[in-house]
Amino acid sequence: METESEPYVRLTTLRQLHQVMADMNTARSLADTLQTVADGVVNGLGYELACVNLVRPDGDLVVAAFAGNSAAEALITGRVGSRVSWDRRLDMGEAWGDLRFIPHTEGWVLDEDDVPQWYTDGPEPRFEDEWHPSDRLFAPMYTPGVQGASCGELIGVLSVDRPRNGRKPGAWGREALQMYAFQAAIAISNARLRANMQRALVRLEREQQALRASEESFRQAFEYAPSGMAIAEMGGDQHGRILRTNDALCRLLGRPASAMRRYSFSDLVHPEDIGTLLRTSAEGGRAELRLGRRDGTYVWVSLRNSVVADAADGPRFLLTHVEDIEERKRRELQLAHRASHDSLTGLPNSAELRSRLSARLCRRPQSAELGAVESLDAAYAHGQYTAEHPAAYDTSGHGEQPPGHGHGFDFTQGPGPYDAFDHHVHTIAPEGQTDDGTKGLAVLFCDLDGFKSINDRFGHNAGDAVLIEVARRLSGAVRDGDTVARLGGDEFVVLADGLGRADAQDLAVRLRNEIIQPVRVDGRTMRVGASFGIGWAHCGMTADEVLKSADERMYVEKRSRPKQHRRAG
């Protein structure tokens, strides 16, 4: 580099400076850029040694590139100097614009700090402008901004040593180094930006690959799942509309995928299960209900919901898993039917009979008459709720409320004369022995006459056949809604609501006439008779009390007839 004493700068020097600046901006990576910056100081600015100290994220400076001496490069490259030590250096010595020159007369105090440095030998200078081996010259590099660097952030420091002409740089040399540091800061910032962009692109590509792999994995899991799956819209006017279904769900419902997209689950659910569907939450909700097939039949399924989103802030969708539980429900219904029905005749058994009878009865005695005031008190003041008739609206979130606190008031505890505010239609019975037009719940207790002799003469198989035929005849002779149950052995009970005394007597005669008809079993003709006792159920009684009353009346009726007339023949 020419000195300021010369009246001009050689054209070759400018070309070299232009070339090294161009090389800085064409380097392919940050490491190449840093090395190009160090090499440019040596090749273009006329210094024998150059070092690039780069600011790390923690603020300290690391030796990132070195040029001019391979031994010194191997010694200090990668070593770190603290930010405090560097700040002290940049505040010492003489300020040459943005440059900082520390003469050997002051630099000796820096020999013991932690900044990586090298030492060069040479003779003592003979002239004032000669370079001393212990002189130090630093060119701070700041983030691009207004030239002058005072408004930018320090990104590194260029350390230069040993000008080739042996002299301290003059005005032109200082301006060239300062301009070079400014351009180097731009090149380093651009290289960092490119590196960050490349890393971001690589990370984005990896994320996209992972996303594509995840989407493909989800697609395969969705499409080839052995149980039904569907994706539906969530929110908005089209909430619940099915967007996509897998083959398993289409096969389960017998509908093509194109047709499924015209429906929502509320369109497919059984009318009796629509409430269950509406109560099922979107996130983690489960429900067991019936969905309609294309052929008009229904299949029991288990629904399990979850919410999925396209992206962090993207639209949310409802992912519904549909499992076929038809076989399990069938077994459950079979077990429930076996538990509540007689295995031989298929009629409701004793437990089911008592359950149906108890559902019609409450604790209010038949003699308790409700006036207008008492009815209002029953509806609004009393706080008791029976197990059969819970509160219609439970705002507390629990299935029942403490007695006496139905509306937040403290009422006196104790059983009342009737059950309050239960919407229960009280069962009453006709009074007296004449038909006064009162309709009630008749309980007809039937005991077969002569059945034991059939068991003894023809065996239990014949007896079972007779019981099955009697059950069929009884079931066919009553109205829809009436109950025919088998208590056990040869005892049957009929519950018939809405009958007066004359109606009950007529029904007993009609049933007896059905029973006494001949029964053919294995080619043999058999006959049995029947004794009926008519009891009346009313509120204030228990199911056992009602059945006992009818049973007693049946024995009275049986004893009232001669033994030879009890059988039909």
Image (cartoon, rainbow, N blue to C red):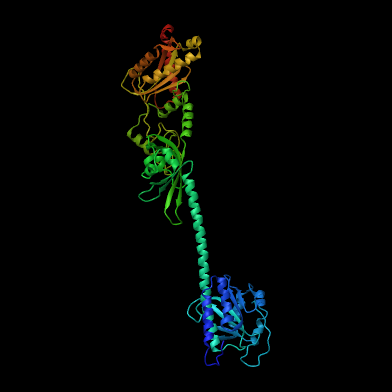
| Name of the residue lying farthest toward the left | 437
Number of numbered discs visible in the structure rendering? 0
Quadrant where the image shows the C terminus: top left
> In the figure, 363 relative to 533: above or below?
below
Query: Considering depth in this image, is 423 or 288 the residue closer to the camera?
Result: 288
Residue positioned 43% across, 52% down in the render:
316
Residue 260 is situated, as x and y percent measured from the top left of the image, at 38, 43
Given the current orientation, which residue lies at the most extreme front position?
Answer: 12
Residue 542: horizontal and vertical position, in percent?
Answer: 44, 26
- Residue 20 left/right relative to 231: right
Is residue 221 visible to us here?
Answer: yes
- Image quadrant in which the N terminus is located: bottom right
Q: Nearer the viewer, residue 260 or 432?
A: 260
Left or right of 26, for residue 61: right
Q: Residue at x 41, y 38 (%)?
A: 253
Do we see residue 405 in this rendering?
A: no
Question: Which residue is situated farthest in the top direction here?
Answer: 564
User: Considering only vertical position in the picture, is 319 above or below 431?
Assistant: below
Q: Nearer the viewer, residue 445 or 274?
A: 274
| Residue 352 point in image, percent of width and height | 45, 26
Q: Is residue 100 above or below residue 464?
A: below
Q: Horizontal placement of 430 versus 145: left or right?
A: left
Residue 115 location in percent, x, y?
64, 77
Quadrant of residue 437 in the image? top left
